[in-house]
Image (cartoon, rainbow, N blue to C red):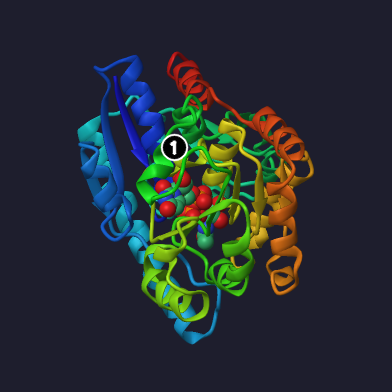
Amino acid sequence: MKILVTGGGTGGHIYPALALIKRMKAINDDIEFLYVGTHRGLESTIVPNHSIPFKALKVEGFKRKLDFEGLKYNLKTIGYFIQSIKRSKKIIAEFSPDAVIGTGGYVSAPVCYAAAKKGIPTVIHEQNSVAGITNKFLARYVSAIAICFKDAENQFKGQEEKVVFTGNPRAQEVADIQANDSLKRFGLDPKQLTVLIFGGSRGAAAINNTVIDHCQALVEADYQVLFVTGREHFEALSSKWKDSCGSENDQSKISIVPYIEDLPSVFASVSLVVSRSGATTLAELTALGVPSILIPSPNVTEDHQTKNARSLSEAGAAELIREDELSSSRFIETVNQLMSDVDMRNDMAAKAKQLGVPDASDKIIHLLMTLMNG
Ligand SMILES: CC(=O)N[C@H]1[C@@H](OP(=O)(O)OP(=O)(O)OC[C@H]2O[C@@H](n3ccc(=O)[nH]c3=O)[C@H](O)[C@@H]2O)O[C@H](CO)[C@@H](O)[C@@H]1O
């Protein structure tokens, strides 16, 4: 069997694709995979590192601002799109896949479009509660639309019958991770209560600055703090911390790092997570049943992170704090309140777990098999 996978840009589109491939390989090691991404996206390094055959297309996104420059840019983008459909057709003819799955990002548009037009069973995966522009465009051509939030159900006008709730493959990949001693790697004690604070795969300046603003309270708190700044922010943050809060080396309860490779194994070992509300992070937190404080990024398409976060907060699985509330004392009060109330945390953890989809990959595989068997 041959499966073509496409999707890219940010970690939020790539990690679900890799998790699905991993699960399919575990079930049947003979399946052949080909991943089609872009030269420039994170996928061009991450995917070959996983020993998955990789081909790249040149694709760009559209500019939303339609001034002269924007229009010129968009014309070029249309040109790339037409070229990439031709190249996708060639790749598909050579590889001859039995099915295609697209996990979002611009690159999945030409590949899924070309595959669907050839009559190959094609599934798109929408991680967010608000559908992305690429998936909205592809909806009418593909065979099925796999979603992760019930809210996304009504966003594919006229194509509702193709929508299937599957969840995010990252949920299945991480669901069985148990609490472990991964905190030791950061100089922290795995037996102590710990809050993990991070701002998505690239870090978030607003969250980082809030941590600095409250560093004295965090230093004096009776719990440990693992603070992940994001690679780009680390140097500036470390020196800010030294200037305003003293050396973190003298504070064995606080650890500041740029990035953590196996973050879900840390999720399983902390008492509370404070983070942005990117879709893949939420799939991991709910699969594991981790209580969280979510601070949605206000800078994303159609405010989708607020809608992602509401799915958890309205179910009692998370506290939602808006970015514009960060200047008030709400941040530190909420962290302190939750860190001092184990019953509340346990209740949130149980409610989070109810939202988790620990068999998400299997649901997608079942969908693909059904489509392939006609
Ligand atoms: C700013 C932006 O446009 N963000 C979008 C992007 O987020 P982003 O790429 O941040 O995606 P998510 O929050 O969904 O996922 C982040 C992934 O990175 C991992 N991780 C993060 C930090 C770290 O130190 N180590 C680590 O491994 C997390 O465990 C998770 O697997 O794609 C998501 C999925 O489409 C969207 O919902 C987000 O709105």
Q: Is residue 112 above or below residue 368?
A: below
Measured as percent of width and height from the top left, residue 217 is found at 64, 66
Give the structural element (helix, strand or loop) at label 1.
helix
Q: Nearer the viewer, residue 12 or 142?
A: 12
Residue 268 visible (yes or no)? yes
Can you say which quadrant of the picture contains the N terminus?
top left
Measured as percent of width and height from the top left, residue 303 is found at 66, 61
Residue topped by disc 1: 265
* Residue found 70% across the figure and 30% down from its top: 350
Q: Is residue 180 above or below residue 218?
A: above
**Amino acid of disc 1:** Ser
Q: Is residue 146 above or below residue 184?
A: above
* Residue found 44% across the figure and 29% down from its top: 173
Q: Is residue 277 left or right of residue 336?
A: left
* Residue found 49% across the figure and 20% down from its top: 362
Query: Quick one: which residue is furthest to the front in this view?
Result: 250
